[in-house]
Structure formats: structure tokens, C-alpha cells
Image: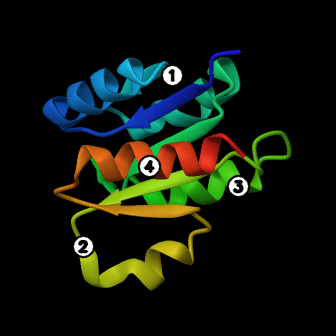
Amino acid sequence: MVKRILVLDDNQDILEVVHETLTYENFEVKSITRGIDVMPLVEEFNPDLVILDYRVAGANGGEICQAIKAHPKFGDVPVIIFSAYVNHSADLFAYGCDAIINKPFDLTELVEKVNGLIKN
């Protein structure tokens, strides 16, 4: 069964690269640009993994991560946070995410972290 990944980033270029890369790796990917859309889409799409930008227009990726982790049905879904704020890793992990990918990021690192979290 194809694994599903939900990606939130307000940078369209990043979304396209991540979407293309993960689709090439045989994942079903849904990309969104607005934080407000995440929880309804999590419930509808039922992802196996979620990737969130930490700073996204109108939302905080860490707080969205907490909402996903607090949800009774999706609390075990792995969450990766993208962040350009390298020095704040401890703060980001405090939100309950399973991994952090620093921006700018390497696509190999992205695929390795996704595979490591999703194929367990």
C-alpha cells in the first residue's frame, strides 16, 4: 500500500521540489500552503507522515505538530519540521516532532528521514 505524506510550506518552490522528490520515491503526496488547512486535511487524507514548515503564513508549525500529536487518531503519525532556525532544535523537539530538517536542506537527507520514520 502506498504511504501518504502531507506537506505544509508557504514557499511554492520548496513545495514543488519536495512533492516531486517524494512522489518519485513512490509516496502519495498532498501539498498545502496554508497552516489553517492542515488539521482538516489530516483527517481527510489520513497521512502516514506530515512535514511542516516551522514558520508558515498565519500559523506556527510547532503548534500544528502539537495539535496532530494530541489528536486521538493521529498522535502516532510521525511529524518532521522544516526550519531555517538551526539554533532552535531543542525548542522544536519540545513541540513533539519526530525529526527536524534544517533549511536549506539536502533532498537525500529528506528522503532518508522520511523513509526512516515511515517504513517502521
> Alpha carbon of mark 2 to alpha carbon of mark 4: how far?
21 Å
- Disc 3 crowd rating (10 Å Cα; few below 14, some 14-19, many 20+) is some
Viewer-nearest of labels 1 and 2?
1
Among the two numbered marks 1 and 2 on one chain, the one whose residue lies closer to the N terminus: 1
Please report whichever mark, 3 or 1, sits nearer to the chain's N-terminal start: 1
Q: Which of the numbered marks, if any, corresponds to residue 8? A: none
Disc 3 to disc 1, how far (Cα)?
Answer: 22 Å
Distance between mark 1 and mark 2 Cα atoms: 27 Å
Residue at (37% x, 27% y) in the render: 32
- Distance from disc 4 to disc 1, alpha carbons, whole Å, reads 13 Å
- Report the amino acid beneath label 4: Glu
At label 3, the amino acid type is Lys
Q: Is residue 5 left or right of residue 59?
A: right
Judging by the rendered image, the residue that carries numbered circle 1 is: 27
Which residue in the structure is indicated by mark 3?
Answer: 69
Q: Which residue corresponds to mark 4?
A: 112
Q: CA distance from mark 4 to mark 3?
A: 22 Å
Residue 102 rendering spot, x and y as whole percentages: 28, 64
Q: Residue at x 77, y 50 (%)?
A: 76
Identify the element where label 2 is drawn: loop
What residue type is disc 2 on? Tyr
| Residue 39 screen position, x and y as percent | 60, 35
Mark 4 or mark 1: which comes first in sequence? 1
**Amino acid beneath label 1:** Phe
Query: Could you say which disc has been placed on residue 85 in the image?
Result: 2
Dot 2, how many residues are within 10 Å of its Cα: few (below 14), some (14-19), or many (20+)?
few
| Residue 86 shown left or right of residue 71 in the figure | left
Q: Earlier in the sequence, mark 2 or mark 4?
A: 2
Labels 2, 4: front one:
4
Query: Does label 2 or label 3 sit earlier along the sequence?
Result: 3
